[in-house]
Image: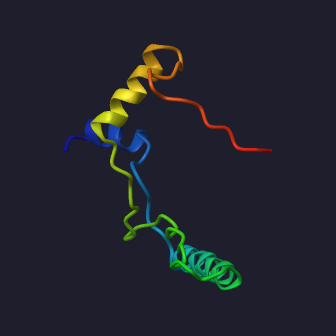
Amino acid sequence: MTDDEIADLAAKDPVGYGRWTRSDLRLAALEDAVHQQTAMMIWLASDRKSKPRMPELVRRPGIRIKRAVLTDEGRAYLQHLRDNQGALPPGYTVIQANN
């Protein structure tokens, strides 16, 4: 690499995460443990008819996040919203929760 290329790389923001210290990793692990304990307490206080929904882990190096896959139908729906200033496609209705 030339000196100019190295200078350009140094000027750019780093992509993703930098190095995490052991304290950072321990703090993330503690946060995960608190979230999982909270989820278990909520499940224990419920009717227990289904499996407990465990929260996702805190994003950090070495932890992969589950991402939802966008289908072709979903892409078409979103494109219709963009093209029509948010108007719903034919056949879709808005469902409102009771307040």
- Residue at the outermost right position: 99
- Viewport quadrant of the N terminus: top left
Rendered position, 35 above or below 16: below
Q: What residue sits 21% from the left and 40% below the top?
A: 2
**Relative to residue 68, is residue 4 drawn left or right?**
left
**Relative to residue 41, is residue 21 drawn left or right?**
left
- Residue at the outermost top position: 84
Q: What residue sits 41% from the left and 21% below the top?
A: 80
- The image shows residue 36 at horizontal and vertical percentages of 58, 79
**Relative to residue 69, is residue 36 drawn left or right?**
right
- Viewport quadrant of the C terminus: top right
- Residue at the outermost front position: 91
Q: How many marks?
A: 0
* Foreground pick, 27 / 54: 54
- The image shows residue 37 at horizontal and vertical percentages of 63, 83
**Relative to residue 74, is residue 98 drawn left or right?**
right
- Residue at the outermost left position: 1
Indicate the quadrant where residue 66 lies: bottom left
Q: What residue sits 44% from the left and 66% below the top?
A: 19
* Foreground pick, 99 / 25: 99
Indicate the quadrant where residue 41 lies: bottom right
* Foreground pick, 75 / 29: 75
* Foreground pick, 69 / 47: 47
Q: What residue sits 66% from the left and 85% below the top?
A: 44
Rendered position, 41 above or below 93: below
- The image shows residue 35 at horizontal and vertical percentages of 62, 75
